[in-house]
Image (tube, rainbow, N blue to C red):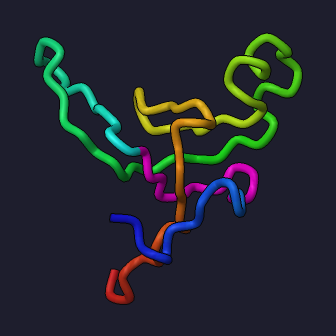
Amino acid sequence: MINSDWIPITEQLPEDQERILAFIPGNRVFLPGKDLAFEVRDVIVLRFCKDYFAQNAEKRKKHGAHFWAGEGNSNHYFADVTHWRPMPPAPANA
């Protein structure tokens, strides 16, 4: 369930290159060393790349101008993410 702390991408976008928590309904993360085994992880860390496909008309038309860069193999096209929220602050005692 999405609560009010999540920001719909239709209402506001992160700053360019900002790392955020992204909500991707039904997001499959394939597990290393397992034949097509996966876990569903609806929330992952991504970095917003504004106008990533600005100079590539074909990709921009197919996937939109923006892109989400992930960690490892978790990159996503813009439309995959429905909501986002800023990264939480580090623990005070860290």
Image vertical order of residue 81 relative to residue 85, above or below: above
Residue 38 image point, x, y percent: 18, 28
> Could you tell me how many numbered marks the image carries?
0
Image vertical order of residue 93 relative to residue 88, above or below: below
Image vertical order of residue 29 relative to residue 92, above or below: above
Q: Closer to the camera, 60 or 20?
A: 60
Question: Magenta span has 15?
Answer: yes
Is residue 34 rendered to the left or right of residue 19? left
Q: Residue farthest to the bottom?
A: 92
Query: Residue 69's quadrant in the figure?
Result: top right
Question: Magenta span has 39?
Answer: no
Identify the image quadrant of the C terminus: bottom left
Residue 63 image point, x, y percent: 68, 24
Identify the image quadrant of the N terminus: bottom left
Residue 3 image point, x, y percent: 42, 73
* Residue depicted at 50% across the width and 31% down the height: 75
* Residue depicted at 64% across the width and 54% down the height: 9
Is residue 36 rendered to the left or right of residue 64? left
* Residue depicted at 72% across the width and 36% down the height: 66
Is residue 9 rendered to the left or right of residue 26? right
Q: Closer to the camera, 8 or 86?
A: 8
Q: Which residues are magenta?
A: 14-24
Is residue 1 rendered to the left or right of residue 32? right
Q: Closer to the camera, 24 or 87?
A: 24
Image vertical order of residue 26 relative to residue 85, above or below: above
* Residue depicted at 70% across the width and 18% down the height: 62
